[in-house]
Image: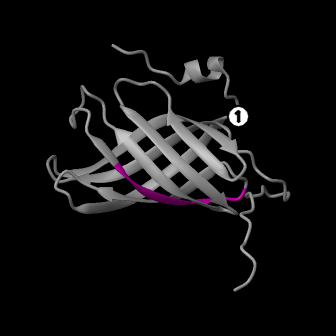
Amino acid sequence: MGEPSTPLPAADGGGQPVNYSGLWLSRYEYESSSRGGTFMGQHYVLVMHHGNRLSVRSVPDSDRGELTMDLTVDGRIVTGTWVEVTATNGYYRGARYHGAIQLVVEPGGRHMAGKWVGFNRDLGVDAGPWTLTFLDPSTSMEALARYTQPST
């Protein structure tokens, strides 16, 4: 066995490491057996980048529920876990779902695309596409407020 590898941060087109901190748009697709069809989940999320770790937290939005992800960056590969607590006033009535995710960072570091895997209401295992798209490098309260939906 060789030396353990050290994860390297992704680089932009000029070879500079990318800082992923900022506001992103998270979108994923899922099949609903109870509603019959494919649906999209969407959250505005705050990403905080520390070393090779990404902490992802949705901005407050009572209509979309709450999303968290804990991710590890290894070059252009991002791997980790996700947890979603659906909106209490939505179709799934505050249900908690969780699973794994793996994304590939596109050159430039401002879009990630990959797949999620997790369980469904019937305790089967589903999978589908998931993307993160960069919106704003700021992590300030003012920037966060632009993407926050007030509670009703």
Q: Left or right: 100 with respect to 80? A: left
Q: Considering the whole magenta stretch, tell me its main secondary structure.
A: strand
Q: Secondary structure at mark 1?
A: loop
Residue 20 in sight here: no
Q: Quadrant of residue 62?
A: top left
Q: Quadrant of the C terminus?
A: top left
Q: Nearer the viewer, residue 81 or 21?
A: 81
Highlighted range, magenta: 98-107
Q: Residues within 10 Å of mark 1 (few under 14, many from 20)?
A: some
In front of the other: 38 or 51: 51
Amino acid of disc 1: Pro
At which x and y percent is residue 111? 61, 51
Seen in the picture, residue 97 relative to 85 is either above or below; the reply is: below
The structure residue drawn at horizontal position 51% and vertical position 36%, both measured from the top left corner, is: 57
Q: Is residue 94 visible?
A: yes
| Residue, disc 1 | 137
